[in-house]
């Protein structure tokens, strides 16, 4: 098997392997590991390890650190030319955000991550006496320095999304016959687009440049994909995985994403959302500008846009029934989301 040939490049004795989603669990003489295709650049793999080592050193936080092969490289290439990484892994299960306790503990875990990721230093600090180690080559420069790219401004992003929504509506109007997805989208478009327009209008009155400038100057980093799939509950506490999208950025992006995904599952329950914000701010206090950022991100109907974009980029002759249900759920939850924003962020459409 190809995965076994890759594992021969590492200084470990493999007892057994078993397949999981797009990867392989590997039981070894040194514990549990996960092997998967890299999916990111070598530079990003170095950044993932650098951030993980920093989190362990500063906060004893557990992450899925990439490990070096026998040549000291963190990316291994198969005979077919595919790149793979081997990561330390944990015995546990995904965080169940349907349970109030785990939802809040997952939120607190994010706050701890952010607190220790607010100032990620160059890789020149001494190695920790125990736990994750960095090799001397990795300490030569800071991968974090390469992660600070100027993102598209939120205002430009929303303006682009708004144009795309109108383009998709024009396309659907010309479709004949129309399917259930097209009919539902056109029926609810005006109301949902008003949310998009309002979020863009709110951005006209707010400048988040200071948040980005502060992140860039301090080396503040984000996970980039913080959701329950990437939070593991283990016997030794919580572990955070899959830092593939970690980069310098506004940390509220992570909190917004986790909060939105959780509230979509909890029907925008005001009490649950309030408790999440409390759990986060008790560890990593929120500034007024950050709260405003969260508010505007939540106003924008991102799930609506994502479904529309997925439709436009897909085979329109067959729309999965689950996409129709997702669209109906987004529209149905609008009233609950409106109440959520009014009570927690004093915003009314």
Image (cartoon, grey):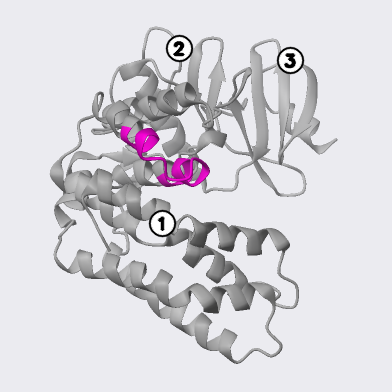
Q: CA distance from mark 1 to mark 2?
A: 49 Å
Is 115 displayed left or right of 331 in the figure? Answer: left
Determine the image quadrant of residue 128. Answer: top left
- Dot 2: element: loop
Is 321 displayed left or right of 263 in the figure? Answer: right
- Dot 1: element: helix
Main SS of the magenta segment? helix
Position in image of residue 56 (x %, y %): 39, 19
- Which sits earlier in the primary sequence, circle 3 or circle 2? 3
Q: Is residue 135 above or below residue 219?
A: above
Evaluate if marks 1 and 2 touch, with contact meaning CB atoms under 8 Å apart. no
Position in image of residue 150 (x %, y %): 28, 59
The tag on residue 335 is: 1
Determine the image quadrant of residue 209. Answer: bottom left
Give the magenta-colored segment's residue range: 260-274
Q: Kindly identify the residue that appears in the image at 44 percent across and 43 percent down.
A: 263
Residue position for label 2: 131
The tag on residue 90 is: none
Q: Quadrant of the C terminus?
A: bottom left
Q: Quadrant of the N terminus?
A: top right
């Amino acid at each position: 098997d190809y995965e076994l040939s890759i594992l021969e490049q590492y200084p470990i004795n493999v007892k057994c392997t078993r397949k999981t989603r797009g990867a392989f669990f590997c039981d070894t003489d040194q514990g549990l590991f996960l092997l998967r295709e890299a999916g990111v650049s070598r530079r990003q793999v170095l950044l993932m390890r650098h951030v993980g080592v920093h989190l362990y050193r500063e906060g004893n936080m557990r992450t899925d650190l990439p490990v070096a092969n026998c040549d000291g490289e963190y990316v291994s290439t198969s005979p077919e030319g595919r790149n793979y990484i081997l990561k330390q892994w944990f015995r546990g299960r995904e965080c169940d955000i349907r349970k109030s306790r785990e939802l809040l503990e997952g939120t607190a875990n994010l706050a701890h991550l952010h607190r220790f990721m607010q100032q990620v230093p160059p890789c020149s600090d001494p190695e920790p006496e125990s736990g994750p180690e960095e090799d001397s080559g990795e300490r030569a420069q800071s991968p974090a320095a390469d992660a600070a790219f100027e993102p598209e401004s939120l205002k430009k992003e929303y303006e682009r999304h708004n144009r795309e929504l109108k383009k998709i509506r024009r396309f659907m109007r010309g479709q004949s016959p129309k399917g259930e997805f097209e009919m539902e989208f056109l029926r609810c478009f005006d109301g949902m687009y008003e949310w998009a327009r309002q979020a863009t209008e709110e951005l006209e009155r707010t400048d988040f440049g200071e948040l980005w400038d502060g992140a860039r100057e301090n080396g503040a980093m984000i996970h980039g994909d913080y959701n329950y799939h990437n939070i593991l509950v283990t016997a030794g506490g919580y572990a955070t995985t899959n830092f593939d999208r970690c980069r310098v950025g506004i940390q509220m992006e992570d909190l917004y994403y986790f909060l939105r995904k959780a509230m979509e599952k909890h029907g925008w329950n005001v009490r649950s959302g309030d408790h999440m914000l409390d759990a986060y701010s008790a560890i990593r206090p929120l500034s007024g500008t950050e709260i405003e950022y969260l508010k505007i991100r939540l106003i924008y109907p991102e799930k609506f846009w994502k479904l529309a974009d997925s439709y436009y980029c897909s085979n329109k002759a067959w729309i999965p029934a689950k996409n129709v249900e997702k669209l109906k759920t987004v529209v149905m939850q609008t009233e609950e989301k409106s109440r959520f924003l009014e009570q927690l962020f004093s915003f009314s459409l």
